[in-house]
Amino acid sequence: MLQVIKRNTDRLIRMINDMLDLETIENGIMEYHYSCFDLSELIEETVFEIKSAAEKSVNFFTDAENLAVFADRDKIKQVLLNLLSNAVKFSPENGEVKILCKKQNSEALVEISDKGQGIPDEIKDKIFDKFFKDKHLGGTGLGLTIAKAIVEAHGGSIGVRSDGKSGSTFYFTLPLKNENTNC
């Protein structure tokens, strides 16, 4: 019984934090603290945290280049936590989640793929909308909205590919560190 209470309390706390984040984003007062960091190290750290907290067994496979980005590390971690948590949530028991991080032109590209149920075509364009909920997805309808706002605030883009039947790949880009950044 205590585990059920704890899970529900954690869910409510996440929902309140998501609503507060969304409020600061919409009011243009979200603070970003930029620094240089290796995106592959952040991915490894985040995967470790997700593995430790996962309620089911999922196998992670990471192929990540060492890429330096100039971004808010905590906010990008929030994006990764959201996308990886969703991948675990929609993966079958003992399923696979693949994470790819590579250089694409002047950007870092991160892809997170699962072998879950997929996302039907008719809702792909809506899943990043505030409070969008669908029987296929569940959740509060805020995590992907916040992830999109964070990525776009960094000058990147975010999206999803899915055939609607067997898995999804969420991806986002971030500008790579360049000579104009103070690193």
Image: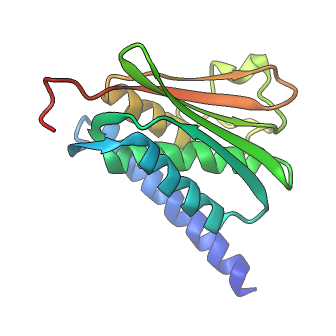
Give the image location of residue 90, x and y in percent: 77, 45
| Location of the C terminus (image quadrant) | top left
Q: Is residue 13 visible?
A: yes
| Front residue of this view, candidates 92 and 29 | 92
Does the rendering let one see residue 139? no
Residue at coordinates 38% horizontally, 35% vertically from top-left? 150
Count of numbered badges drawn on the protein: 0
The residue depicted at 69 percent of the width and 34 percent of the height is 113
Q: Residue at x 76, y 17 (%)?
A: 122
**Left or right relative to 90: residue 110:** left
Front residue (pair 59, 116) = 59
Image location of residue 3, percent across then percent down: 70, 81
Q: How is the image coloured?
A: rainbow
Q: Is residue 19 above or below residue 181?
A: below
Q: Nearer the viewer, residue 151 or 23?
A: 151
Q: Residue furthest bottom?
A: 2
Dividing the image into 4 quarters, which one contains the N terminus? Answer: bottom right
Horizontal relation, residue 13 to residue 38: left or right: right
Horizontal side, residue 97 vs residue 70: left or right: right
For the point 74% across and 40% down, the residue is: 137
In the orientation shown, which residue stands out farthest toward the top? Answer: 105
Image position of 86 with respect to 49: above or below: above
| Snapshot quadrant of residue 131 | top right
- Please state the horizontal and vertical placement of residue 121, each as a whole percent of the image: 77, 17
The vertical placement of 109 against 33, above or below, is above
Task: Give the x, y percent position of residue 73.
Answer: 33, 47
